[in-house]
Amino acid sequence: MSGLNYPEEEHLIKPEEAVEHAALSVLRNAPLGQFDAQVWLKSNVKKDPAVVYDLNGKPLFYICEVGQGEEMPGTVHLAASRVLGRPELAIELGRPAWNFDTAVKRLTPRVKKEFPRSRISAPRLIAYSYPKLGVMYDIDSPSGKQRAIYDVGSLGRIPERHERPDSEGAYAWSFYESLDNNRRKANLALMRKVDKARDRLPARTRAELRKTRSLATMIDKVGFTIKKSKVRKLPYSPNYAWNHARGHHCFELYAQQVDDYCAVATCQMVLAYYRYYFSQATIAPSLGYSPGGGCPSDQSPGYRSLSCNQLDASFDNTPTFAEAMTQIDGLHPFKSGIPGHARACAGYSISYITPIGSDFQKLLIYDPWPWNADYAAGGAIRWEDWSTPTKTNYVTTKIKCP
């Protein structure tokens, strides 16, 4: 992307800084009740986070593992450049359903066979359509230079261009190229506030954040103050809060069964909440799915037809966080669209934390990616920062009332 005043490579965050940010993220969010704080706080942030690259070859974000021994309650996705705005992109619950080393072991012989007499680069872990990850090879062949991208879960080949640009499916695009100068400038200003708060910590405390065996020992040393907070999930019963001992979450994660079935699996999740049960193969035609092309972003007609018009489903291409709150407060899950991808939303959180002095707004995302041969093992649940990635649309739902 030419003409940028704030190139991402000039504002990179070092891996050791990312580990600090990951530790601070857990400490900030633990009191809010977004996850099992007891398990997360007895853990530490592992050194040497995995680097995920953008399609343009620049580091995009880090995946920081949080755990103790063999136990891993989850990971934190940390920005690799300050032009992304906030350091914390997402907190993902549980162990990832994909393995880069396994994917490379299976893909490399295939790539060599597909591109004979070519110079093939070392594989890279990339975000081909954030948060979907892939393995990328640069190919220098007799016919010219190109690159080959494969989904890290399904190992399917991912195209870089799409005939239906407003669709939600499986194709590659550059996250960095989606950020214009105005967005980058605003993001850098926001990141300065976060850096300023972190710089106030004594150097010794920051060093401990990177080395501690238990994050619980750092709570008093960090000294965050939560001025306001609210967390909502979809409960089974109004008699109990979602985090009550007798309460539990009623939204289920369904993984996509085909690489470009993200919208299909998302619809399946939302319909199941309302007790409409369909297979993904049944849902796909109703959403306008085309093989290899995914679904158009407005899937609301399919939601209505599959529920025999008992659901009031609406498409909104100007989504706001306030609208997300209204949906969840009304006990209505919805589809949240981002560039090239569809996911279900089943909760939100909002907090104002000092000394950072900024609102933290998150959506609880049930992501049908990644694909896994064992569908029960696929997908991911994460608390995702509202502003990253850009929310492109919603399909909101509610039961029709006379």
Image (cartoon, helix red, strand yellow):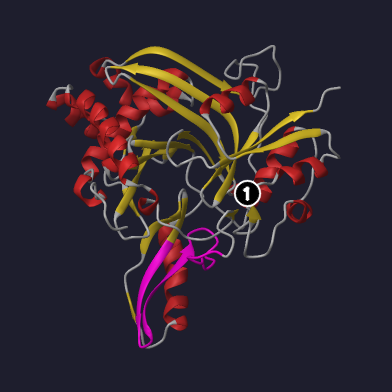
Secondary element at image label 1: loop
Residue highlighted by disc 1: 297
Residue 68 appears in the rendering: no
**Residue at (57, 54) in percent of width and height:** 166
Q: Residue furthest left?
A: 203
Count the marks. Answer: 1
350 or 323: nearer the viewer: 323
- Using the image, determine if residue 186 lies above or below residue 248: below
**Residue at (29, 45) in percent of width and height:** 80
How many residues crowd around disc 1 within 10 Å: few (fewer than 14), some, or many (20 or more)? Answer: many
Q: Which residues are magenta?
A: 135-162
Q: Amino acid at mark 1?
A: Ser
> 399 left or right of 155?
right
**Residue at (36, 31) in percent of width and height:** 43
Q: Quadrant of the C terminus?
A: top right
> 210 left or right of 92?
left
- Using the image, determine if residue 398 lies above or below residue 107: above
Residue 134, magenta (yes or no): no
161 or 349: nearer the viewer: 161
- Using the image, determine if residue 148 lies above or below residue 330: below
Residue 143, magenta (yes or no): yes
Residue 278 location in percent, x, y?
79, 46
Residue 303 appears in the rendering: yes
Residue 122 location in percent, x, y?
32, 69
Q: Which quarter of the figure has residue 221?
A: top left
**Residue at (28, 58) in percent of width and height:** 2
Residue 313 location in percent, x, y?
73, 36
Q: Quadrant of the N terminus?
A: bottom left
- Using the image, determine if residue 400 lies above or below residue 394: above
